[in-house]
Structure formats: structure tokens, C-alpha cells
């Protein structure tokens, strides 16, 4: 388990904005080399350019994580550029329909699961050979606080259900990949106002306690460098509270 990200190669899907952008910048600041992927390359290219301007190394790749050939090309691009894949962060996701339970378009349901579950698995599958060859690697699946029994603010049914599946994928692969030296965790960032939730129903955000999206920066670096058991769901907000940092990022939506 590395206690430093210096020289590590980190692939982040959904790396062009929101949580992905802030995670990428925090990780790059610790000396890691970044490969950022999103369906829209321009967003990732902007983040990569900002990382480079700050003295880091990053490249941008257009990739729809639900398309097998594009995921293969993404991982090959990382290997061609940096010769290894140390960390994969499955952050790319589809927000899902906010329709009533009896009116969710099945195409939206399928699209959400294609991005959030199929996409995560495809990225894992294609990154695994490089990790297994080195008997070392870390897979991080971004989950959601909405995928917790009893959570009372479900915005999208397919999104929430898909994140339960992501947690299941994390637990199962932690067991299956232990002998390969590959650690698997889920990262639950909390709730921030980003473009990802722009389809929220009217009034959904009003009065809600939220965080600014940069709140993920310190927790993700800690999770990647600390000795956290494989299979663990890392709760970013709990970590911030334990460090006295929670109020730094908290606000209430008007």
C-alpha cells in the first residue's frame, strides 16, 4: 500500500468537471500522473491543461465508459503514456431519470446502468491486467450517500439502485482480487451542487445541507494513501468531520 502518490498513474473517469475535476487536481498536486476521461474530451482537456500549468502531468481521452472498445483504448492510452496503471477511479456516471416510479423510461434506466455499473466493470476489467502483472493496484468506485438504507432524499430511482449495485461490485471484487494484490474500495463523496444534479425536481435542493464540490480533495488523497481495508466504503463527510474540516465546505441551499 503506497503512502505516497508521487509517480503513480491514476485513471479517472468523469474527470472533466465536478468531483472528477477536483479529485484530479488534488491527486496531481501529490505528484501523480493523471489520465482523465469523459465522453466530452474538451472538458478533460481543460482540466489536464490546468494540471500541466501547475507543474503536473495529465492527458485527456474521450471515452464513453459503456462502450467496450473505447474503454480498451482508454486503458491502452494510459499504458502508452505512462507504462502502468496504479489507480482507477470510476467516477463517470449518469444521473438517471427523476420520473415517478411508475413512469421511468426504460431507455433511461438502461442508460443509467450502462454508465454506472457496466461502465465501472468495463473499466475495471481493462485495467486489471496491468495491475495483476505488478501484483499491485487500487480500484475506487464512486458511490453515493443515497445508496444507504433509510436515506430519505432519493432524487433518481435508477441512479440510487445503480449505486447499490456499485457497492455490491466493490464488496465482491475486494474478495475476488485480494490474492492479486489489488485493493477495491468505494468512495462516498457526500452531496454537492454540481451540474450532475441539474435535473433535480423543483424544490429538491431548497434548504438542503450541502458541500462545495472541492470538499472531495482532501478525503480522496487520504483514502488513496492510507491503510484502509479492501472492501471498505470510505465516507468523505465522516472523514471531514473527524478532522474538523466539515464546516469549511458546508452550506445550506437557498
Image (cartoon, rainbow, N blue to C red):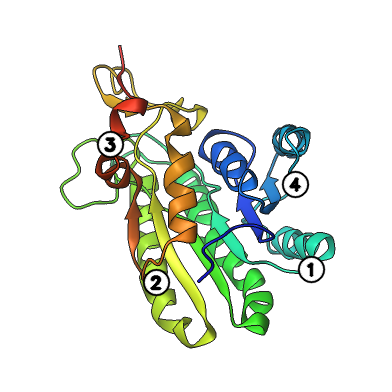
Q: Is residue 170 in sight in this rendering?
A: yes
Residue extending furthest toward the top: 254
Question: Where residue 119 appears, x then y in whole percent?
Answer: 57, 58
For disc 3, the marked residue is 244
Residue identified by numbered label 1? 83
Q: Where is residue 188 in the image (x, y as percent from the top left)?
A: 37, 49
Q: How far apart are marks 3 and 4 (CA)?
A: 31 Å
Residue drawn at x 72%, y 32% as measured from the top left: 50
User: What residue is shown at x 64% (from left), y 37% (from top)?
Assistant: 16
Q: Do the residues labelled 4 and 1 touch (CB within 8 Å)?
A: no
Q: Which of 116 and 1 is in front in this view?
A: 1
Q: Nearer the viewer, residue 18 or 103?
A: 18
Q: Upstream in the sequence, badge 4 or badge 2? A: 4
Please tell me how crowded label 1 is: few (under 14), some (14-19), or many (20+) other residues with Cα within 10 Å. few
Alpha carbons under labels 2 and 1: distance apart: 25 Å
Residue 156, given in percent of the width and then of the height, sits at 35, 39
- Per the image, the residue denoted by label 2 is 230
What residue is rendered at 49% in x and 53% in y?
Answer: 116
Element on which disc 2 rests: loop
Q: Which of marks 1 and 3 is in front?
A: 3
Q: Where's residue 73, x and y in %?
A: 78, 61
Q: Would you name the residue on which mark 4 appears?
A: 58
Q: Give the mark nearest the N terminus, 4 or 1.
A: 4
Amino acid at each position: 500500500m503506497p503512502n505516497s502518490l508521487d509517480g503513480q498513474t491514476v485513471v479517472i473517469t468523469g474527470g472533466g468537471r465536478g468531483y472528477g475535476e477536483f479529485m484530479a487536481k488534488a491527486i496531481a498536486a501529490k505528484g501523480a500522473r493523471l489520465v482523465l476521461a469523459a465522453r466530452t474530451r474538451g472538458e478533460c482537456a481543460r482540466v489536464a491543461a490546468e494540471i500541466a500549468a501547475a507543474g503536473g502531468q495529465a492527458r485527456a481521452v474521450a471515452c464513453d465508459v459503456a462502450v467496450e472498445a473505447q474503454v480498451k483504448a482508454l486503458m491502452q492510452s494510459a499504458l502508452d503514456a505512462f507504462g502502468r496503471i496504479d489507480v482507477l477511479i470510476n467516477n463517470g456516471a449518469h444521473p438517471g431519470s427523476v420520473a415517478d416510479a411508475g413512469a421511468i423510461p426504460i431507455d433511461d434506466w438502461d442508460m443509467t446502468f450502462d454508465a454506472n455499473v457496466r461502465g465501472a466493470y468495463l473499466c475495471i476489467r481493462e485495467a486489471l491486467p496491468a495491475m495483476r502483472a505488478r501484483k499491485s493496484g487500487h480500484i475506487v468506485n464512486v458511490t453515493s450517500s443515497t445508496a444507504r438504507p433509510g436515506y430519505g432524499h432519493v432524487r433518481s430511482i435508477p441512479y440510487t439502485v445503480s449505486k447499490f449495485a456499485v457497492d455490491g461490485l466493490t464488496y465482491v471484487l475486494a474478495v475476488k482480487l485480494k490474492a492479486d494484490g489489488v485493493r477495491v474500495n468505494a468512495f462516498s463523496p457526500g452531496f454537492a451542487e454540481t451540474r450532475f444534479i441539474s435535473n433535480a425536481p423543483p424544490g429538491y435542493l431548497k434548504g438542503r445541507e450541502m458541500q462545495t464540490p472541492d470538499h472531495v480533495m482532501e478525503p480522496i488523497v487520504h483514502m488513496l494513501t492510507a491503510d484502509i481495508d479492501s472492501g471498505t466504503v470510505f465516507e468523505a463527510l465522516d472523514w471531514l468531520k473527524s478532522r474538523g474540516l466539515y464546516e469549511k465546505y458546508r452550506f445550506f441551499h437557498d
